[in-house]
Amino acid sequence: MNQKGWHKQVGWLYVLPALLLLLTFLIIPFCMSVNYSFTDYNMLTPGLKKFVGLQNYIQTLTDPVFIKSLRNILQFVVFIIPIQLGMALGLALIVNKKRPGNMFFKISFFAPNVVSLTVTAVLWMYIVNPDQGLLNNLLGLIHISPQPLLTSPKQAMFVIIGISAWQGAGYQMLIFLAGLQDIPHSLYEAAELDGANAWQRFRHITMPSLRPTTMMIMTTTLIAALNLMTQAMIMTQGGPDNATMTPIYYIYRTGFTDRQLGLASAMSVIYGIVIIFFTIIQRKVEGRAQKDD
Amino acid sequence: MKHWKIGVMTVAALAGLSLTACSNGSKNADSKDITMWVHFSNTDPEGKALAKNIKDFNKSNKHGYHATVKYIPRSGSGGGYEDKLNAAVNSGSLPDVLTLDGPNTAAYANAKIIQPVGQYITKKDDILPTIKAQGTYKGKLYAVGYSESSIGFYYNKKMFKAAGISDSELPTLSKPWTWDQFNAICKKLHDKYKTPILNMSLNDHSEMSLYSLAPFIWSAGGDITNKAGTKAVGYFNSKETASAVKFIQDLVKNKYTTVSPKDKGFETGKYAMLMTGTWEVQTLKTQYKNLDWGVLPYPVSPKTKKLVSPTGSWQYAMSSQAKNKKAAGALVNYLAGTKASYRTDMANTVLPARKSTSKLMLKQADEATKFFIKQNQQSGHARPVIVNYPQITRTFAETLQDATYKPNTDVQSLLNKQAKVMQKYLDQKN
């Protein structure tokens, strides 16, 4: 074997662990899902599964709950990205300035991210309890009548959006903070000498400099948002009236509670295609933004 | 190329090894060894009681059978144990004997995870009818419950007295309140305290919904499905079912109860009543010693005046892969028998599943437990035994959620719609 051929083989050896992991946990399960999606696989009777053609796909696409879950996740994504990003950037700007007690604020803002989602969901359920919860008590102080919150199909998703943004913003604040600290101070000094005010400095120096960071955060937020499940599962079980039902929770419920793995697999494949669609749009937006730069 | 060959050989060897590890060994019909899986931990009171029962069984049985138990505690969401069972179904490595929750009987029997066990069970007349109903699928006994459960209306004696409700007005098992009388009592309490006075756990949309609220429907003469579990239309949307759902909806509309109850509200004196299970007795006795409380039966439909209460719990069953059926049957029979179930029920402070065990427990039980044992025997009603039970119980919970979260919803049209949803699940082939 010549030197070049050997190098090539060693290269393959280096990527082998990653390839094996991808193959075991991503590619093979995905192929299995596609295979199951054409069968009537019931979890308790794996030996009896048979080919049913496109039946599971037709059932999924005509299932009003699945369609509603797609609408819900779209609503979630549309609201969570600007809210969470705005919160994260705001918090990063607060802690970016050197002032006493900065470390306390950094830790406080980051703390929700360390606590498990299940725990925070349970804690928030006390706060947003319509009858005696803290939130309605506070609203009462400013003469706003008690809100139904999680018990209302109109408000429940917004409560979940708020809680999710609160939970996720701290981590993204840290990434923004790193981005902010990378901006050369000389730029701000030059702008100040040119007479730029605080808003102009933010608009023309901070924001453009943070664009790569923002893009990265947008991508991670989008991925996390599309996987929304825990909050809905713990706080509302997808209700009321399926107002907080998310695709992932619905797939989980169909597969593991209703034991219909065939149907759940078809839902996964369809949702996978939806996610790919979202990713393509995001890549295009990202590409256009980079061109503009 | 040698490297590749070595790699392929290593992978093949590893795959071979893992396959060997997964296999369950050869099946031997004369095997005296019995394997058993249970859903609780060996450190729980229930686990400790089972360990003693297994020791007794191994010592006392005349055939030399030897049982070993694997403890697989359920996780918070109820997974863990079920996940392990599902995996075992797929890999063909089920134990000889297993535990299963009451509502799973039909699905497990239909999927041939468990097999009929009736011929190995002695003294069947001693078993409560509700326990037999819970474990019976298509006329055959597949599983035997070793404990029971129930729900009652816990009440705060001090708050009742302050609202002017005398002891003589309180209902008994032989003379329960009708819904009208119950509403009058709620009004008295609500007039006095000006807040919801009853926690019915209407925020709980799990199995608790059907388990705790279906007795109202059964009391009215309605039902969720027909007896065979094949039809929901005509049953879940019957006038009788609608009258019960309307009664529950009106409790919310009149603000006697709430869809978002405060946790531990009854225990801390915020609600005068709490509708919950037998498990609350231990909580109140150990953690809220200063609370003066009692338990009342379910209110009954004014038309039928029939008292109905919920039942059901975990059971023992023989798996379809049991090596030696006689041995596995003997173990199920022993564990569900009077002596063993008495030990488990006492350790776990749950209700008995046998008449003989009830007699033994009644001698020692506190007033509340005595009440529950009697209520169980007089008015217990098993949940429907349906293969697609998870979908049925969820549709039930969603229906009650819709009726109570939006108290102006027309109950009859809601039930008409939801009965069709249930019917769709009942018609699904498994």
Image (cartoon, coloured by chain):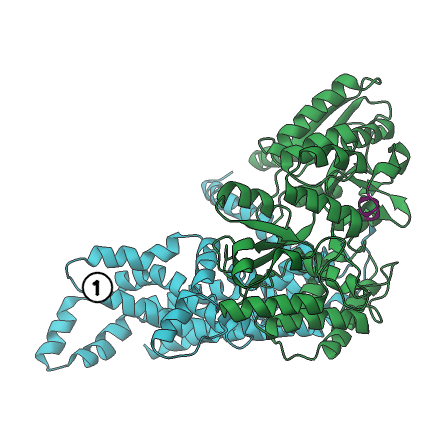
Chain colours: A cyan, B green
Picture quadrant where residue B7 is located: top right
Q: Amino acid at mark 1?
A: Asn
Residue B86, visible in the rendered structure: no
Assign the C terminus of chain A to one quadrant of the image: bottom left
SS for dot 1: helix
Q: Position of residue B18 (x, y in %)?
A: 66, 33
Horizontal side, residue B73 vs residue A289: left or right: right
Residue A210, visible in the rendered structure: yes
Q: Position of residue A169 (x, y in %)?
A: 36, 64
Q: Position of residue B269 (x, y in %)?
A: 48, 56
Picture quadrant where residue B202 is located: bottom right
Q: Position of residue A11 (x, y in %)?
A: 47, 45
Picture quadrant where residue A135 is located: bottom left
The chain ID associated with circle 1 is A
> Residue at label 1?
A96
Circle 1 Cα neighbour tier, 10 Å, few/some/many (<14 / 14–19 / ≥20): some
What are the residue bounds of the magenta stretch? B128-133
